[in-house]
Image (cartoon, helix red, strand yellow):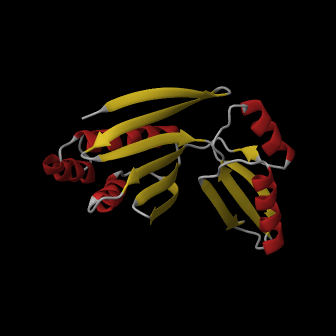
Amino acid sequence: MNHEQVCEHEGNTRMNTVTTQLPATPLRIKKVTLWRREITAHPDAFADALTLLTEGGMELPVILRYRHPTDARRAFVEVYPLPSDHDETWTAYLNGIGFAPRHVPVLLIETAHPAGDGHALTKLIANLRVNIMFLATQIIDGKCAATIEFETDADAEKAVGMLMRMTAETPENRESLEVQNANGGL
């Protein structure tokens, strides 16, 4: 098994990146900051927000758009921009176009998707037994990505620990780990 932990810094926020080797499948778990902007619920407002983001030249591995829960005329756009070499530049740009960082615990999980690993990741997420505010997953062209917002930092840390333990297990032992988690053990 190959395991390394790297710490990155974004302002005063500490971000942990954990890269762990599943059998023939790397798993990347990263704590990320989502940036949010409120817009009207009109399609043109969303298109305008996306245009401003693309003009900034940022890579956006996560883009979310959803309506306000109590006002159908309002909506939110949330993005996770890959930081460039010029953190101050992209931070100023995002602030300048109306985006502000959200200080909520969010994990971005990325892995290749050989047969069965998508099932294992889904089962593990189901067995986390923590409060999840939202979950978005997708599998495209053999790559699996999950974006998970947690209610608390403690829940996010618990999820990271459990994901690390899962990836450290051999395929034969992975089932026993999931059963233990499902029963509240560990």
Quadrant of res 139:
bottom left
Image coordinates of residue 57 in percent, x first then y, are 74, 48
Q: Residue at x 37, y 45 (%)?
A: 27
Relative to 50, 161 lies left or right: left
Q: Residue furthest left?
A: 172
Residue at 68%, 44% (x, y): give it: 102
29 relative to 172 in the view: left or right: right
Describe residue 33's horizontal placement relative to residue 128 as left or right: right
Where 133 sits versus 140, above or below? above
Q: Is residue 81 above or below residue 92?
A: below
- x and y percent of residue 23 in the render? 24, 46
**Considering the image in quadrants, where does the N terminus appear?**
top left
- Residue 42 seen from this side: no
Residue 21 seen in the current view:
yes
* Residue with the most extreme right position: 96
Q: Report whether 27 appears left or right of 73.
A: left
Place of residue 28 in the rendered image (x, y in percent of width and height, measured from the top left): 42, 43
Q: Residue at x 77, y 66 (%)?
A: 46
| Quarter of the image where the C terminus is located | top left
Q: Nearer the viewer, residue 18 or 42?
A: 18
| Image coordinates for residue 67, horizontal then vertical, percent | 70, 68
Quarter assignment of residue 182: bottom left
Above or below residue 182? Residue 185 is above
